[in-house]
Image (cartoon, rainbow, N blue to C red):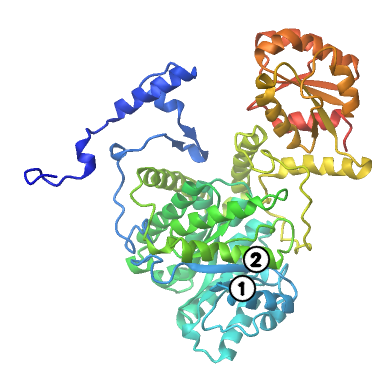
Amino acid sequence: MTAESPELPLAAAFPDADRAQWQRLVEGVLRKSGVTEATGPAAEDVLSTDLQDGIRVRPLYTAEDGTTALGHPGFPPFVRAGRPEGTTVAGWDVRQRQVHTDPQRANEAILADLENGVTSLWLTVGDGGVPVAGLEQALRGVYLDLAAVVLDAGADFAAAAEELLRLYAASGAPLREAAGCLGADPLGLLARTGDDAKLRLQLESAARMAERCAADAPGVRALAVDALPYHEAGGSAAEELGTSLATGVAYLRQLTGAGLGIDDACRQLEFRYAATADQFLTIAKLRAARRLWARVAEVCGASPAASAQRQHAVTSTVMMTRRDPWVNMLRTTVAGLSAGVGGADAVTVLPFDAALGLPDAFARRIARNTQSVLLDESHLSKVIDPAGGSWYVESLTEELAGAAWAWFQEIERAGGQATALRSGMIADRLAATWERRTEDLAHRREPVTGVSEFPHLAEPPVHREPAPTPIGGGLPRVRRDDAYERLRSRSDAHLAAHDARPKVFLAALGPVATHTARVAFAANLFQAGGIETVQEPATVDAESVAEAFARSGARIACLCASDAVYGEQAVAVAATLKSAGALRVHLAGKPGERRDEFAAAGVDSFVFTGCDAVEVLSSALDVMEVA
């Protein structure tokens, strides 16, 4: 800088780039790669991604996209944070889940958690958890005035709440200083069980609990608005949000009808959402949830001070895998980060082995330490709304809020949450969403690392003590790995019966450089179904393939080569394989114009990026008569 020149930021020396310039660069890349000759906005559309709920993610967001008024942290519409200080003072609440049924074992785990970074407890009580009568033993040694307790007691919520309140009183600490949530959620229970025989009585009981908390224990919330049943049934982010709004509105009606003021009624609700490894969608979902609930509270006449949504985010069970469970550590880390960045008040990171049974001490320690790293080493809680101002996040938040509000209105027009659950309307909607997602999973458009992509067949299985069977009878519980888990189980049964897994022979044709990519693709595909791949020798031709196939011990084969080599050798090699006894011959790649010729030579199916992997693998196991 000279004395005469103004002190300008470095960026000021460069001309502004506009969207049209960026699109022209995109056009050039797409044209050179042979993808398309599209120009302008059409070129940009090629790089766009469709999400659930009709949301389309574009490759570029700028100030031109615009955002709505966000307000300030701690003020309506609470998009940026539920409190002015966000989580900057003490971080978010690290909430560990406890699922042991034995009170003594539960107590040991609880004390270990509290001594190592956990700040509140989430206890499964009653059916599938610690007996109500064992709650005192499970909480022995816990300072109830310091550690908030959240109950998940299903149909036993009233008895569990009474016992916890008794323990609060017996501890000698002032009840008004207690914190936590009694966990009454009659509509969530209806979603889980499908049983509405006692719904009216349960709603009345929950209202009485809320009145008592409002009067004597203002730090304890009586009701949980748990959206996990809808997420775990395959619902989308917007469907999860919309059902939570409908549930929350139903509870407000019940509480105000019982005599509570609207502000007190709002303060009796805690909302629970799933956090997934889709980082930006999770952040946007939590921000949109606060925006939506602020609007509901405003319409109901609540004051701004009572309109902020209290959020508990839980890492998704749908994303957790049973195979290669170590990868779940990465998933829960991203999900926990997303929950914290999204502004959740409390975060539960489930142990990586939770899908296998009761988590062991190591898994629980990793779950705790994941949050400790995020809070104490990464300092994620030291910034209010760290994703705020991102044009992408703001746009995604707005679109998600719009889709969720439309679904909420649809439920309300149908008569409300209880009616929509009873009629099957919600179940049908979630099932349709899951069916579409299942198609994406089957075609590997939504990859599952360690399962549908990069499976490790030699990985020793991880065993855990069986966990209590969760309550059922209502909405189903799904997992992303369901279809592939069934395939792998068939392979495991074959291994147990024959001391070997089912095999596929990879007939690699031509030079290594021309077949490596498709060999890797085929190996990845077949191993996802538990089918071991054999490539010995590295390259075969029509003269050597029969002997190599017989030596492999495989019963099916897959040709792997470039399109040019297929044109020269595929017909002869496929015919030789069929003559050598191959029950099925696959070809890695799209068939193109020579489909009929290849089929006539013995190629039974073509496997390629985007094919129905589950169907290919299931039919391959069928051919090999794998049970």
- Which label's residue is closer to the chain start, 1 or 2? 1
Rendered location of residue 37, percent (x, y): 43, 16
Which corner quadrant holds the C terminus?
A: top right
Task: Report the number of discs.
Answer: 2
- Near mark 2 (Cα within 10 A), the count class, few <14, some 14-19 or many ≥20, is many
In the rendered image, residue 357, in percent from the top left (x then y), is placed at 74, 60
Instruction: Locate the N terminus by quadrant.
Output: top left
Instruction: Write down the residue under mark 2.
Output: 364
The image quarter containing residue 615 is top right
Query: Helix or strand or loop: what does disc 2 sit on?
Result: helix
Looking at the image, which is closer to me, 140 or 462? 462
What amino acid type should be assigned to the residue bearing mark 2?
Arg
Looking at numbered disc 1 in the image, what kind of residue is underneath it?
Answer: Asp
Q: CA distance from mark 1 to mark 2?
A: 8 Å
**Which residue, given by chain and number where applicable, does mark 1 sit on?**
113
Residue 522 visible? The answer is: yes
Give above or below for 47 relative to 332.
Answer: above
Q: Nearer the viewer, residue 579 or 65?
A: 579
